[in-house]
Amino acid sequence: MTKSISAESIAALVERLCVEANTYLPPDVGILLECAAESEPDDSARAALEDCVANFKYAASVGLPICQDTGMAVVFADVGQDAHISGGLFEDAVNLGVRNAYVNNRMRCSIVGDPLRRVNTNDNTPAVIHTRLVAGDALRITVAPKGFGSENMSASIMFLPSDTRETIEDRITEVVRNAGSQPCPPVILGVGLGGTLDACARAAKLALLRPIDTRNGDPFYAEMELRTLHKINALRIGAQGFGGRHTALAVNIEALPTHIAGLPCVVNVSCHVTRHASGEL
C-alpha cells in the first residue's frame, strides 16, 4: 500500500530541521570538542577550544545559531519508493521549509541567485537537494547547513590510478595545510574517493554526516583515515590557528567504484561546527 506524505508536512519538517541544525551541535561533535579542550597542552589553543565549547553550549541554551554563517541549506532525502507526495512538488516543499526557517527565525540569508550577478535571494533558497529512492514508504530528510568559510577551502584532485595511498594521504593533508586557520579549525574532513567527479563530491559531503567517532567499515580505509588524521594534526595549525595538537577532529573517507583510468578525490572541509539534523515522515 502506498503511503501519502503531504508537501505541507515536508515543509514543516525541513523548517524544524534547519533551525535545529543551526542551533544544536551534534552530540558526537560536541563531546569530541570537549575532550580536545581538556587534553590540549597549548594554552592559547586550549583557550580557543574552551571558547568553542562555551559558544555551542550557550547557543543551545538560548536558542540562537551556533555560528553567524547559518550556511547554505544542503538537504539529503531518502524517499521510499512506496511513498506518494501529495499537495505539491517535493522540491518546492523543501524550499518552502528552508524559506520559513531562515526568514521567520531571522537567520542570516546568504544565498545569491546567480554566481556572477550576486543578488541575494533574501530567503536562503534555493537549497541544494540530493534525493535517493530507497525501499519502503518513509521519507527521511537530513539538513546539513554548510558555511563557506570552510567550503571555500575544499578541493578536488584527479589522481592517477597509479598514485599510492600515501600520496593521497599527503595531498589531503596539503589541502588542510593550505587552508591554515581560514576554515575555523579544528576541522572535520569528508573525503570522497572514486566514482565520477560529481559522485565523488556527493560522497565527500555525505561523509561529513557520519558520526566522527565511527571509522570506515573497511579496515583498509579505517587505517587510512587514522593515518591522515595523524598527519594533519602533526601540522600543528591547531584550534583557530593558535597551534597545538588539534588541527582536525576526524577524517571520514567514503570510497566508490570508479573507472579503470581514473581516481577522483574530493576533500570537503568542514569547520568545528559541522551541523546536521535528521527527521522522518
Image (tube, rainbow, N blue to C red):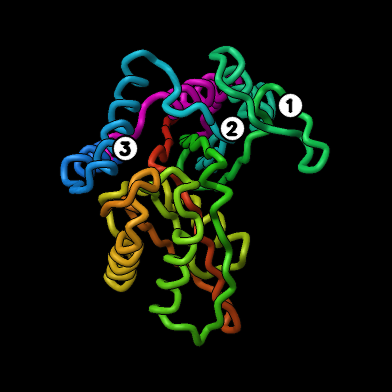
Q: Residue furthest right?
A: 117
- Contact between labelled residues 1 and 2, with CB atoms less than 8 Å apart: no
Q: Nearer the viewer, mark 2 or mark 1?
A: 1
Tell me the amino acid under the disc marked 1.
Answer: Thr
Q: Residues within 10 Å of mark 3 (few under 14, many from 20)?
A: some
Q: Secondary structure at mark 2?
A: strand
Q: Secondary structure at mark 3?
A: helix
Write the start and end of the magenta stretch as one range: 1-28
Q: Residues within 10 Å of mark 1 (few under 14, many from 20)?
A: some
Q: Gap in Å between the C-alphas at discs 2 and 1?
A: 30 Å
- Residue at (63%, 25%) from the top-left corner? 109
Question: Is residue 5 shown in magenta?
Answer: yes
Horizontal side, residue 16 vs residue 55: left or right: right
Question: Is residue 51 shown in magenta?
Answer: no
Q: Earlier in the sequence, mark 3 or mark 2?
A: 3
Q: Earlier in the sequence, mark 1 or mark 3?
A: 3
Tell me the amino acid under the disc marked 3.
Answer: Ala
Q: Quadrant of residue 54?
A: top left
Horizontal side, residue 104 vs residue 277: left or right: right
Q: Which mark is residue 48?
A: 3
Q: Which mark is residue 121?
A: 1
User: Which residue is under mark 2?
Assistant: 84
Is there any visible trace of residue 135 in the rendered image?
no
Q: Nearer the viewer, mark 3 or mark 2?
A: 3
Q: Secondary structure at mark 1?
A: loop
